[in-house]
Image (cartoon, helix red, strand yellow):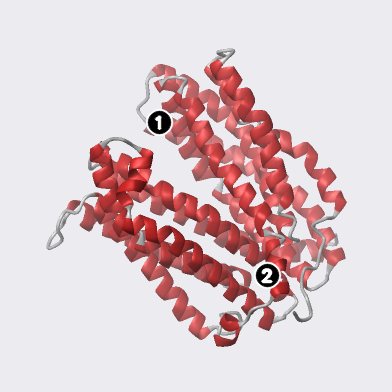
């Protein structure tokens, strides 16, 4: 890669990754704001809302896989400058997201009590959670449709706009939570339900902003023709990607539950230390996730434009970026680790676990860079979603979690050994990456001239 090519690559990646990373951080702050406000209300309120939000978490696994799959093809058609078909696929994402959102909205609105009873037998938690769920269910439809337009913004080069929307929604959420949860001025104290109303307000503002943007930028925004368009070939193109992406999302989502289950049987000190480590991880990984999303868009544009050799050159550069990102993650782990260690009040044994968990987290986050930038970036850009699902299944569900379960319940290993084994999945996946890269399954132009 020449000096000019390096400069072009760095400029393009930074212009995409920095806004996307900021958007990820701001999105995480919305959830953190809700948890903080409710945490100062009652223990039952935060527990009930946490359980109720498992419905939206599962919904996002499905809608994220659908919209993410469509974004692969939208990016390639955009890189090809075939805006007509880019709009058609964008319209397809709207149909998928709306259908999935409605599927989850209806039971959440109509039978919230039965859904809450599935998660807990506690009557008070069911009562609070049901009231919250019936109200917050309306935000499912708004957020599903808005996610499609945010995807279009990212692909078409309006990444900074997504940051502005996220910044406004964070501020709105914090202010609305303050007024509606606790009741300030003329507003009544609504408790957990107030958090639901603030979520609706946030998603409604986001959607309204997206629709105004779409009205001004018609190049990629769906119109009557694209919304009414249907093609069996295009549907098949999407369904070559969706199963792999959905499988990886479900494997990842279920692994979080499995981790909580294992740690929950290692004592309160281990649970407390793991909870703080999870907070630190969320505050660190947004950089890598922004880079991964930026890489997916960059490579997708090149593949759609049929610049396959240039895509190869960019891929080799991305491997070096992983080392730089890994070093940044190690630094952030040390910085954030110090902050959470100082901020949280923990028992001495829990702090002992926390320090050692954070040390291992530095290695984990270094490996996380390689896996994210390739499986969620390079491979996904070329439609190779199957590898992510296969690697998560074998590394997590056939290796790390079974071994951790044996260590916890059969061999009774020390807490730190169980934690390390449980988190080895990201590390064991890295040596396989070069083999998958050189197979060039991802090096594909997925576009068609016409259906």
User: Which is nearer the eye, 67 or 171?
Assistant: 67
Image quarter (top left, top right, bottom left or bottom right) of the N terminus: bottom right
The residue located at (45%, 56%) in the rendering is 26
Residue 13 locus on image (x, y percent):
68, 61
Counting residues from the start of the chain, the first of labels 1 and 2 encountered is 2
Quarter of the image holding residue 329? top right
Residue neighbourhood size for the residue with mark 2, other residues' Cα within 10 Å, grouped as few (<14), some (14–19), many (≥20): few
| 3D distance between C-alphas at marks 1 and 2 | 52 Å
Residue 154 locus on image (x, y percent):
59, 68
Location of residue 251 with respect to 178 vertically, above or below: above
Residue 237 locus on image (x, y percent):
72, 67
Instruction: For residue 336, say whether it is visible.
Output: no
Residue 358 locus on image (x, y percent):
54, 30
Q: Of the residues tagged 1 and 2, which is closer to the observer?
A: 2
- Identify the element where label 2 is drawn: helix
User: Which is nearer the eye, 342 or 345?
Assistant: 345
User: Which is nearer the eye, 101 or 346?
Assistant: 101
The residue located at (32%, 65%) in the rendering is 201
309 relative to 100 in the view: left or right: right
| Residue at numbered disc 2 | 235
The residue located at (49%, 22%) in the rendering is 353
Residue extending furthest left?
A: 186
The residue located at (32%, 53%) in the rendering is 111
| Residue at numbered disc 1 | 342
Image quarter (top left, top right, bottom left or bottom right) of the C terminus: bottom right
Instruction: For residue 210, say whether it is visible.
Output: yes
1 and 2 marks in contact (CB < 8 Å): no
User: Which is nearer the eye, 229 or 367?
Assistant: 229
- Identify the element where label 1 is drawn: helix
421 relative to 256 in the view: left or right: right
Residue neighbourhood size for the residue with mark 1, other residues' Cα within 10 Å, grouped as few (<14), some (14–19), many (≥20): few
């Amino acid at each position: 890669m020449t000096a000019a090519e390096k400069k072009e690559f760095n400029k393009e990646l930074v212009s995409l990754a920095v806004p996307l990373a900021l958007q990820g951080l701001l999105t995480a702050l919305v959830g953190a704001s809700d948890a903080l406000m409710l945490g100062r209300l009652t223990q039952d309120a935060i527990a009930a809302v946490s359980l109720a939000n498992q419905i939206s978490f599962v919904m996002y696994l499905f809608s994220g896989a659908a919209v993410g799959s469509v974004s692969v093809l939208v990016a390639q058609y955009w890189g090809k400058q075939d805006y007509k078909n880019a709009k058609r696929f964008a319209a397809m994402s709207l149909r998928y997201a709306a259908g999935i959102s409605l599927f989850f909205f209806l039971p959440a609105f109509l039978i919230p009590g039965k859904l809450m009873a599935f998660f807990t037998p506690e009557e008070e938690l069911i009562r609070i959670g049901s009231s919250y769920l019936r109200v917050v269910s309306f935000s499912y439809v708004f957020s599903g449709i808005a996610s499609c337009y945010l995807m279009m913004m990212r692909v078409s080069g309006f990444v900074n706009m997504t940051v502005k929307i996220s910044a406004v929604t964070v501020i709105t959420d914090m202010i609305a939570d303050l007024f509606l949860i606790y009741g300030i001025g003329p507003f009544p104290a609504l408790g957990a339900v107030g958090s639901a109303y603030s979520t609706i307000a946030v998603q409604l503002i986001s959607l309204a902003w997206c629709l105004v943007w779409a009205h001004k930028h018609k190049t990629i925004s769906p119109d009557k023709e694209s919304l009414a368009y249907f093609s069996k070939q295009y549907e098949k193109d999407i369904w070559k990607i969706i199963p792999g992406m959905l499988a990886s999302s479900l494997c990842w989502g279920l692994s979080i539950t499995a981790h909580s289950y294992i740690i929950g049987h290692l004592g309160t000190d281990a649970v407390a230390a793991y909870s703080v480590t999870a907070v630190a991880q969320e505050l660190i990984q947004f950089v890598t996730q922004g880079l991964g999303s930026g890489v997916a868009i960059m490579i997708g544009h090149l593949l759609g434009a049929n610049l396959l050799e240039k895509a190869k050159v960019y891929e080799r550069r991305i491997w070096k970026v992983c080392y730089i990102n890994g070093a940044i993650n190690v630094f952030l782990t040390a910085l954030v680790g110090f902050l959470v260690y100082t901020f949280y009040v923990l028992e001495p044994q829990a702090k002992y676990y926390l320090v050692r968990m954070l040390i291992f987290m530095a290695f984990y986050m270094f490996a996380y860079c390689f896996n994210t930038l390739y499986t969620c970036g390079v491979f996904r850009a070329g439609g190779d979603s199957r590898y992510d699902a296969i690697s998560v299944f074998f590394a997590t569900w056939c290796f790390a979690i079974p071994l951790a379960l044996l260590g916890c319940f059969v061999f009774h290993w020390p807490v730190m050994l169980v934690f390390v084994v449980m988190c080895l999945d990201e590390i064991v996946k890295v040596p396989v990456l070069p083999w998958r890269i050189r197979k060039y399954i991802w090096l594909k132009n997925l576009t068609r001239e016409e259906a």
